[in-house]
Amino acid sequence: MRFLLHLDIAEGMNLLPFNYQYPVSAWIYKTINEGNHEFAAFLHEKGFVNGSRSYKLFTFSQFRFPPKGFRVANNCMQLQCSQAQLELSFFVPEAMQHFIGGLFREQTFSIGDKQSKVNFMVRHVEALPFPDFANTVSFSANSPIMVSRYDENSKYAEYLKPGHADYERILFDNLVRKYAAALEAGLLANTSTALNGAVDMRFSFKEPVKQKGIVVKAGTPMQTQLVGYMYDFEITAPRELLYIGYFSGFGEKNSLGMGCAKYLT
């Protein structure tokens, strides 16, 4: 399920840090925790597990502002508008849709610090329609899609760009693992051939491809740089995998606002 949050921006401080993804993620956890502490703790501490890997199965878009809604100032976005939008997307049972949607109604939250901060209020929560996917779908990245790999001789991840020889394989492997984790958690029925390696899965992307990095826990000893790419793409796969990608995010670090994609056709 996916929600579009219509946000009002409070008057006063209007400097939004570029790296707002981590505090937005923290606000999402906090909001869920207020309604269901056990589910929030499960997401934050464990998640949906497949083997040694854990997935949160939710993501969110970048903030959307109206045309000329901000300008760059003091290494921040200086907002020049009174409203914004934010998409939240969860791969959870349909029965939880009204519950989760209700949690975010009329919520207030702040992003930033003493020098740069913006106060938001959720004016309206819009439940977006459930798309009817074919087996080949076109998407556009609403937030950077991150695909990485580790070399045994390096302790740092290598962030891959679309077109890299391993990009498609790693992207699909991530989707299959998320599907397996959702299946194990009982979020869907095992009626698909998605775990069968013989199924037809193809990926193609369109130029331009724009690199976009985010900094997590900026200004702390745990500061981390993540790198993803914004682009349009077409993907062929079993519908269950497409829904996993659409609702929980494509690629990695989805709960930090990476891999949210807009359905095109």
Image (cartoon, grey):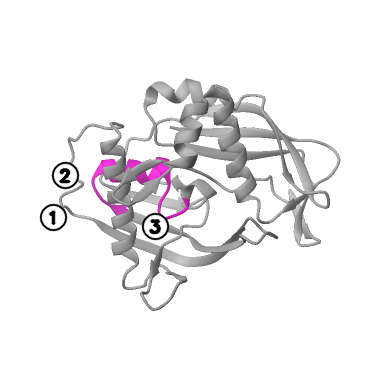
Does 71 lie within the magenta span? no
Q: Residue at x 41, y 43 (%)?
A: 248
Residue 265 appears anywhere in the view: no
Q: How many marks?
A: 3
Q: Residue furthest right?
A: 12
Q: Nearer the viewer, residue 65 or 101?
A: 101
Residue 68 appears anywhere in the view: yes
Q: Is residue 73 left or right of residue 170?
A: right
Secondary structure of residue under mark 1: loop
Name the spot of residue 31 as percent of width and height, x first. Answer: 59, 31
**Is 148 drawn above or below residue 253 in the view shown?**
below
Disc 1 residue type (three-letter): Ala
Asked if the residues shown at circle 2 and circle 1 are in contact, with their CB atoms under 8 angstroms apart, the answer is yes
Can you identify the residue that label 3 sits on? 233
Can you identify the residue that label 2 sits on? 193
10 Å neighbourhood of mark 3: few (<14), some, or many (≥20)? some
Asked if the residues shown at circle 2 and circle 3 are in contact, with their CB atoms under 8 angstroms apart, the answer is no
Secondary structure of residue under mark 2: loop
Q: Which residues are magenta?
A: 235-253
Disc 2 residue type (three-letter): Thr
